[in-house]
Image: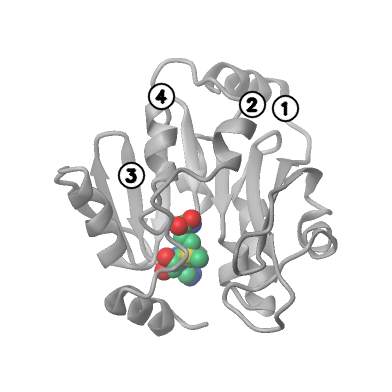
Amino acid sequence: MDKAFWHQRWQDGRIGFHQDEVHPALPGHWRYTPHGASGQVFVPLCGKSNDMVWLAEQGWQVVGVELSEKAIIDFFDARQLEPVRTEVADSLLLFEAGAYQIYCGDFFHLHRAQMADICTVYDRASLVALPEALRHRYAFHMAQMLSPGVSVLLISLEHEKSSGPPFSVEEDEIRWLFGSNFEIQPLERLPEDDRNVTDVAYRMVRKGRTGMSEAQKKAMRC
Ligand SMILES: C[S@@+](CC[C@H](N)C(=O)[O-])C[C@H]1O[C@@H](n2cnc3c(N)ncnc32)[C@H](O)[C@@H]1O
Protein backbone atom coordinates (compact mmCIF):
# COMPACT_ATOMS: atom_id res chain seq x y z
CA MET A 1 0.00 0.00 0.00
CA ASP A 2 1.75 3.13 -1.04
CA LYS A 3 0.82 6.63 0.01
CA ALA A 4 -0.95 7.31 -3.28
CA PHE A 5 -3.36 4.47 -2.49
CA TRP A 6 -4.53 6.16 0.71
CA HIS A 7 -4.67 9.64 -0.80
CA GLN A 8 -6.87 8.24 -3.57
CA ARG A 9 -9.13 6.47 -1.06
CA TRP A 10 -9.69 9.74 0.79
CA GLN A 11 -10.16 11.68 -2.45
CA ASP A 12 -12.78 9.20 -3.68
CA GLY A 13 -14.50 8.96 -0.30
CA ARG A 14 -13.80 5.21 -0.13
CA ILE A 15 -13.38 5.22 3.63
CA GLY A 16 -15.48 2.27 4.75
CA PHE A 17 -13.17 1.97 7.79
CA HIS A 18 -14.46 5.27 9.19
CA GLN A 19 -17.06 4.84 11.91
CA ASP A 20 -19.66 7.42 12.86
CA GLU A 21 -19.91 5.96 16.35
CA VAL A 22 -17.21 5.58 18.97
CA HIS A 23 -15.64 2.12 18.69
CA PRO A 24 -17.50 -0.15 21.13
CA ALA A 25 -14.27 -1.47 22.72
CA LEU A 26 -12.92 1.98 23.55
CA PRO A 27 -15.07 3.13 26.50
CA GLY A 28 -15.08 -0.35 28.05
CA HIS A 29 -11.32 -0.81 28.00
CA TRP A 30 -10.14 2.74 28.57
CA ARG A 31 -9.07 2.71 32.17
CA TYR A 32 -7.04 5.88 32.52
CA THR A 33 -7.91 9.19 34.05
CA PRO A 34 -5.56 11.97 33.05
CA HIS A 35 -4.41 14.32 35.75
CA GLY A 36 -5.18 17.85 34.73
CA ALA A 37 -4.92 18.71 31.08
CA SER A 38 -1.47 17.25 30.58
CA GLY A 39 -2.23 13.67 29.59
CA GLN A 40 -1.36 13.03 25.96
CA VAL A 41 -2.72 10.08 24.03
CA PHE A 42 -1.17 9.13 20.70
CA VAL A 43 -3.53 7.97 17.94
CA PRO A 44 -1.49 6.58 15.03
CA LEU A 45 -2.95 6.51 11.49
CA CYS A 46 -5.90 8.39 12.94
CA GLY A 47 -7.95 9.20 9.84
CA LYS A 48 -10.78 11.47 11.02
CA SER A 49 -11.75 9.06 13.77
CA ASN A 50 -14.52 10.05 16.15
CA ASP A 51 -12.68 8.04 18.80
CA MET A 52 -10.38 11.06 19.09
CA VAL A 53 -13.37 13.14 20.16
CA TRP A 54 -14.31 10.62 22.84
CA LEU A 55 -10.73 10.70 24.15
CA ALA A 56 -10.72 14.50 24.21
CA GLU A 57 -14.03 14.45 26.06
CA GLN A 58 -12.34 12.33 28.75
CA GLY A 59 -9.81 15.13 29.23
CA TRP A 60 -6.98 13.89 27.02
CA GLN A 61 -4.79 15.92 24.70
CA VAL A 62 -4.94 13.94 21.47
CA VAL A 63 -1.84 13.63 19.28
CA GLY A 64 -2.60 11.98 15.94
CA VAL A 65 -0.74 11.25 12.74
CA GLU A 66 -2.39 10.82 9.37
CA LEU A 67 -1.13 10.83 5.79
CA SER A 68 -4.17 12.49 4.31
CA GLU A 69 -4.51 16.24 4.73
CA LYS A 70 -8.10 15.88 3.51
CA ALA A 71 -8.90 13.58 6.46
CA ILE A 72 -7.43 16.09 8.90
CA ILE A 73 -9.24 19.08 7.39
CA ASP A 74 -12.51 17.10 7.42
CA PHE A 75 -11.95 16.25 11.09
CA PHE A 76 -11.45 19.88 12.14
CA ASP A 77 -14.21 21.19 9.84
CA ALA A 78 -16.72 18.79 11.38
CA ARG A 79 -15.98 20.37 14.76
CA GLN A 80 -15.86 23.93 13.43
CA LEU A 81 -12.28 24.22 14.60
CA GLU A 82 -9.74 26.24 12.65
CA PRO A 83 -6.39 24.60 13.21
CA VAL A 84 -3.08 26.44 13.25
CA ARG A 85 -0.83 24.81 10.65
CA THR A 86 2.93 24.62 11.28
CA GLU A 87 5.72 22.99 9.31
CA VAL A 88 7.80 20.70 11.47
CA ALA A 89 10.83 18.59 10.68
CA ASP A 90 10.95 15.66 8.27
CA SER A 91 8.08 16.44 5.92
CA LEU A 92 5.50 16.77 8.66
CA LEU A 93 2.87 19.45 9.05
CA LEU A 94 1.23 19.95 12.43
CA PHE A 95 -2.44 20.97 12.66
CA GLU A 96 -3.44 22.19 16.14
CA ALA A 97 -6.75 23.31 17.59
CA GLY A 98 -8.57 22.64 20.84
CA ALA A 99 -7.47 19.34 22.38
CA TYR A 100 -6.05 18.06 19.09
CA GLN A 101 -2.58 18.05 17.55
CA ILE A 102 -2.56 16.09 14.33
CA TYR A 103 0.59 15.55 12.33
CA CYS A 104 0.00 15.32 8.62
CA GLY A 105 2.56 12.99 7.08
CA ASP A 106 4.06 9.57 7.32
CA PHE A 107 3.98 7.75 10.67
CA PHE A 108 7.53 6.59 9.92
CA HIS A 109 8.72 10.21 9.88
CA LEU A 110 7.71 10.79 13.49
CA HIS A 111 10.53 10.87 16.00
CA ARG A 112 10.83 9.92 19.62
CA ALA A 113 11.09 13.61 20.49
CA GLN A 114 7.52 14.14 19.27
CA MET A 115 6.35 11.29 21.53
CA ALA A 116 8.16 12.51 24.67
CA ASP A 117 4.97 13.43 26.56
CA ILE A 118 2.82 10.55 25.36
CA CYS A 119 1.24 8.67 28.28
CA THR A 120 -0.74 6.11 26.34
CA VAL A 121 -1.68 5.04 22.81
CA TYR A 122 -5.02 4.25 21.18
CA ASP A 123 -4.45 2.27 18.00
CA ARG A 124 -7.43 1.12 15.96
CA ALA A 125 -7.08 -0.34 12.46
CA SER A 126 -3.50 0.81 11.86
CA LEU A 127 -1.75 -2.53 11.57
CA VAL A 128 -4.55 -3.87 9.40
CA ALA A 129 -4.01 -1.00 6.97
CA LEU A 130 -0.43 -2.09 6.29
CA PRO A 131 0.96 -5.01 4.26
CA GLU A 132 3.09 -7.53 6.11
CA ALA A 133 6.51 -5.99 5.51
CA LEU A 134 5.31 -2.60 6.70
CA ARG A 135 3.68 -4.13 9.78
CA HIS A 136 7.19 -5.13 10.90
CA ARG A 137 8.48 -1.64 10.43
CA TYR A 138 5.42 -0.25 12.17
CA ALA A 139 5.86 -2.41 15.29
CA PHE A 140 9.56 -1.63 15.47
CA HIS A 141 9.07 2.11 14.98
CA MET A 142 6.32 2.21 17.60
CA ALA A 143 8.57 0.44 20.10
CA GLN A 144 11.41 2.86 19.34
CA MET A 145 9.22 5.87 19.99
CA LEU A 146 7.52 4.81 23.24
CA SER A 147 9.05 4.92 26.70
CA PRO A 148 8.95 1.89 29.00
CA GLY A 149 5.65 1.72 30.86
CA VAL A 150 3.57 3.36 28.12
CA SER A 151 0.47 1.29 27.40
CA VAL A 152 -1.34 0.75 24.13
CA LEU A 153 -5.00 -0.15 23.57
CA LEU A 154 -4.72 -1.94 20.22
CA ILE A 155 -7.72 -2.92 18.16
CA SER A 156 -6.94 -5.29 15.32
CA LEU A 157 -9.29 -7.30 13.15
CA GLU A 158 -9.58 -10.81 11.80
CA HIS A 159 -11.26 -12.27 8.73
CA GLU A 160 -10.92 -15.24 6.40
CA LYS A 161 -9.84 -13.37 3.27
CA SER A 162 -6.22 -13.46 2.19
CA SER A 163 -6.19 -9.94 0.78
CA GLY A 164 -6.48 -6.45 2.23
CA PRO A 165 -6.61 -3.79 3.38
CA PRO A 166 -7.95 -4.41 5.86
CA PHE A 167 -5.52 -7.26 6.42
CA SER A 168 -6.40 -9.91 8.96
CA VAL A 169 -3.85 -9.59 11.80
CA GLU A 170 -4.24 -12.29 14.41
CA GLU A 171 -2.89 -12.82 17.90
CA ASP A 172 0.07 -14.96 16.82
CA GLU A 173 1.28 -12.25 14.50
CA ILE A 174 0.72 -9.52 17.09
CA ARG A 175 2.82 -11.49 19.57
CA TRP A 176 5.49 -12.00 16.93
CA LEU A 177 5.54 -8.33 15.90
CA PHE A 178 5.39 -6.74 19.34
CA GLY A 179 6.27 -9.50 21.83
CA SER A 180 9.93 -8.68 22.29
CA ASN A 181 9.16 -5.07 23.22
CA PHE A 182 5.68 -5.20 24.77
CA GLU A 183 3.77 -7.23 27.34
CA ILE A 184 0.59 -8.29 25.53
CA GLN A 185 -2.78 -9.11 27.03
CA PRO A 186 -5.77 -10.04 24.85
CA LEU A 187 -8.85 -8.22 26.17
CA GLU A 188 -11.90 -8.98 24.07
CA ARG A 189 -13.16 -10.47 20.80
CA LEU A 190 -16.10 -8.45 19.59
CA PRO A 191 -19.02 -10.14 17.80
CA GLU A 192 -18.42 -10.78 14.08
CA ASP A 193 -19.97 -8.08 11.92
CA ASP A 194 -22.07 -8.51 8.77
CA ARG A 195 -18.88 -8.69 6.61
CA ASN A 196 -17.58 -11.58 8.78
CA VAL A 197 -14.96 -9.35 10.36
CA THR A 198 -14.11 -9.71 14.05
CA ASP A 199 -12.47 -6.86 15.95
CA VAL A 200 -10.10 -7.95 18.71
CA ALA A 201 -8.81 -5.68 21.47
CA TYR A 202 -5.44 -6.05 23.24
CA ARG A 203 -3.64 -4.15 25.94
CA MET A 204 0.11 -3.86 25.46
CA VAL A 205 2.69 -2.25 27.75
CA ARG A 206 6.11 -1.18 26.51
CA LYS A 207 8.71 -3.28 28.28
CA GLY A 208 11.99 -1.96 29.59
CA ARG A 209 13.61 -0.37 32.52
CA THR A 210 12.58 3.05 33.62
CA GLY A 211 15.07 5.04 35.65
CA MET A 212 13.40 6.11 38.89
CA SER A 213 13.13 9.71 37.84
CA GLU A 214 11.60 8.86 34.47
CA ALA A 215 9.11 6.48 36.08
CA GLN A 216 8.19 9.05 38.68
CA LYS A 217 7.76 11.74 36.06
CA LYS A 218 5.56 9.46 33.97
CA ALA A 219 3.47 8.42 36.95
CA MET A 220 2.88 12.06 37.77
CA ARG A 221 2.05 13.00 34.19
CA CYS A 222 -0.28 10.12 33.34
C1 LIG B 1 -7.81 1.77 8.08
S1 LIG B 1 -7.64 3.49 8.23
C2 LIG B 1 -7.92 3.70 9.97
C3 LIG B 1 -8.20 5.13 10.37
C4 LIG B 1 -8.52 5.33 11.85
N1 LIG B 1 -7.57 4.70 12.73
C5 LIG B 1 -9.92 4.90 12.17
O1 LIG B 1 -10.09 4.12 13.12
O2 LIG B 1 -10.86 5.38 11.51
C6 LIG B 1 -5.91 3.74 8.02
C7 LIG B 1 -5.50 5.19 7.91
O3 LIG B 1 -4.09 5.28 7.93
C8 LIG B 1 -3.65 6.27 7.03
N2 LIG B 1 -2.27 5.89 6.71
C9 LIG B 1 -1.86 4.85 5.94
N3 LIG B 1 -0.52 4.77 5.93
C10 LIG B 1 -0.07 5.78 6.73
C11 LIG B 1 1.24 6.21 7.14
N4 LIG B 1 2.36 5.59 6.72
N5 LIG B 1 1.34 7.28 7.95
C12 LIG B 1 0.23 7.93 8.38
N6 LIG B 1 -1.03 7.57 8.03
C13 LIG B 1 -1.18 6.50 7.23
C14 LIG B 1 -4.65 6.21 5.89
O4 LIG B 1 -4.72 7.42 5.16
C15 LIG B 1 -5.96 5.89 6.65
O5 LIG B 1 -6.63 7.07 6.99
Colour convention of the picture: one colour
The tag earlier along the polypeptide, 1 or 3, is 3
Residue in the image at 63% along x and 42% along y:
153
Under circle 2, the secondary element is: helix
Q: Are marks 2 and 1 in contact (CB under 8 Å)?
A: yes
Rate crowding at label 1 as few (under 14), some (14 to 19) or many (20 or more) other CA atoms within 10 Å.
Answer: few
Q: Percent position (x, y) of residue 222?
A: 55, 23
The amino acid marked with disc number 3 is: Gln
Residue 110 makes an appearance in the image: no
Mark whose residue sits in front, 1 or 4: 4
Disc ID at residue 59:
4
The amino acid marked with disc number 1 is: Gly
Q: CA distance from mark 1 to mark 3?
A: 28 Å
Q: CA distance from mark 2 to mark 4?
A: 23 Å
Q: Would you name the residue on which mark 1 appears?
A: 211
The amino acid marked with disc number 4 is: Gly
**Vertical arrangement, residue 148 with respect to residue 175, above or below:** above
Foreground residue among 221 and 122: 122
Residue 124 makes an appearance in the image: yes
Q: Are marks 4 and 3 in contact (CB under 8 Å)?
A: no
Q: Percent position (x, y) of residue 166?
A: 59, 72
Under circle 1, the secondary element is: loop
Rate crowding at label 3 as few (under 14), some (14 to 19) or many (20 or more) other CA atoms within 10 Å.
Answer: many
Mark whose residue sits in front, 4 or 3: 4
The amino acid marked with disc number 2 is: Glu
Mark whose residue sits in front, 1 or 3: 3
Under circle 3, the secondary element is: strand
Residue in the image at 73% along x and 43% along y:
204
Disc ID at residue 101:
3
Residue in the image at 17% along x and 43% along y:
81
Disc 3 beta carbon < 8 A from ligand 1?
no
